[in-house]
Amino acid sequence: MNARRTILGAAAGAVGVAAAGAALGVRRQSRAIGRRTPDATPFGSLRSPAMTIVADDGVPLHVEVDELDPELRRKASPLTLVFCHGYALNLDCWHFQRAAYRGLVRAVYYDQRSHGRSGRSPDGHATIDQLGHDLRSILEHVVPEGPVVVVGHSMGGMSIVAFAEQYPELIGDRVVGVGLISTTAGGLDPSRLLLPMLPAKLGGRLAHGTVRTLARGHRSVDGARRIGRSVARVVTDLFAFGDEVPAAYVDFVDSMLSQTPFEVVAEFFPSFNGLDKFDAVEVLGRVPTAIICGTADKLTSIGHSRKLHERIPGSTLMECENAGHMVILERHGQVNAALDQLLSAAAERVGQS
């Protein structure tokens, strides 16, 4: 009980830190972010008719499919792209990829369980292994036939690794290409993932054993984050990006993080701590696999991507200089170019089979 009071007191104290942000330079930094070059990217505006897919344990998953432009169907690639988003984000994080491929390739976007518009996971099912099964459910219902290229960012990449471990027979059969962005298959310090999602400096005090206690007081944590907006903005900028990006990018990521209840964040936390699947990734060498990461990624550092590259025969590795964890936004041009090459390699493989 005393530990709980200490932790929740720290969360409440974060509100005071936010109020005193000027003294710490936080508000000044937040204003500096706001003075960056304006950007009018309409984040969250790309929509398609929604459908609901029920996972194997009954959780409803929100799915949107961008279909091919009818005029291109005869000439278009038979591939379907499936995008798996990261921890505490939602399908809108793929804005620049969605804008680039909209109408040109059939593309599937979905909210991971307990994220975005998908339903909440039952107790004990907020795991990386379950996300692998969810990906299988998406393929069964939304892409029942034809070749697929799966692309995952952060936790989405871990979902793909779990899927490959669970269903290796589908790699090279249904799945003909893989993109792994800012992700890992193990050896992660999960407390680092919490830093952009906790108010003020609470993340620095956080030990693995206190997350469950924080979850019981999740409303205090959520409330502290909402009140300490300038703090949240600065922390998001620090941990999500490497170089200076427009304020609109920072605010967009911060809005996704703040919309994810801390209770959900805490439910997934133990799964990261126990992740150890590097021995399972070799199977991805059967298909073209593109690995992408920023060299300034503070959450899943570049070393994780280099290790994936070493373990996956024939894979390619693109290191985006000085980019952070949200490389899909920060270096969207480079990321999209790498995905273009992945699609070409996957299409060529399909043509040869």
Image: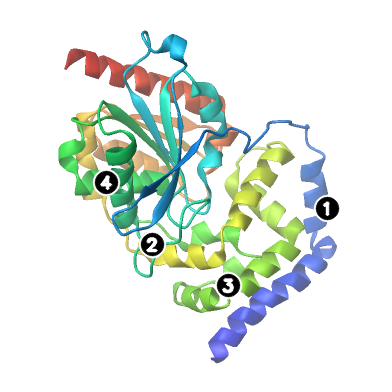
Q: Compared to 85, does 114 lie above or below? A: below
Q: Compared to 122, does 119 lie above or below? A: above
| Residue carrying label 1 | 28
Q: Name the secondary structure under disc 1.
A: helix
Left or right position of 134 against 284: right
Q: Earlier in the sequence, mark 2 or mark 4?
A: 2
| Residue carrying label 2 | 126
User: Image quadrant for the C terminus?
Assistant: top left
Q: Name the secondary structure under disc 2.
A: loop
Q: Compared to 177, does 282 lie above or below? A: below
**Kind of residue sitting beneath label 3:** His
Asked whether disc 3 touches disc 2, contact meaning CB atoms under 8 Å apart, the reply is no
| Residue carrying label 3 | 218
Residue 256 in picture, x, y percent from top left: 60, 50
Marks 3 and 2, Cα distance to the nearest angstrom?
A: 16 Å
Residue 165 in picture, x, y percent from top left: 21, 48
Asked whether disc 1 touches disc 3, contact meaning CB atoms under 8 Å apart, the reply is no
Quarter holding residue 44: top right
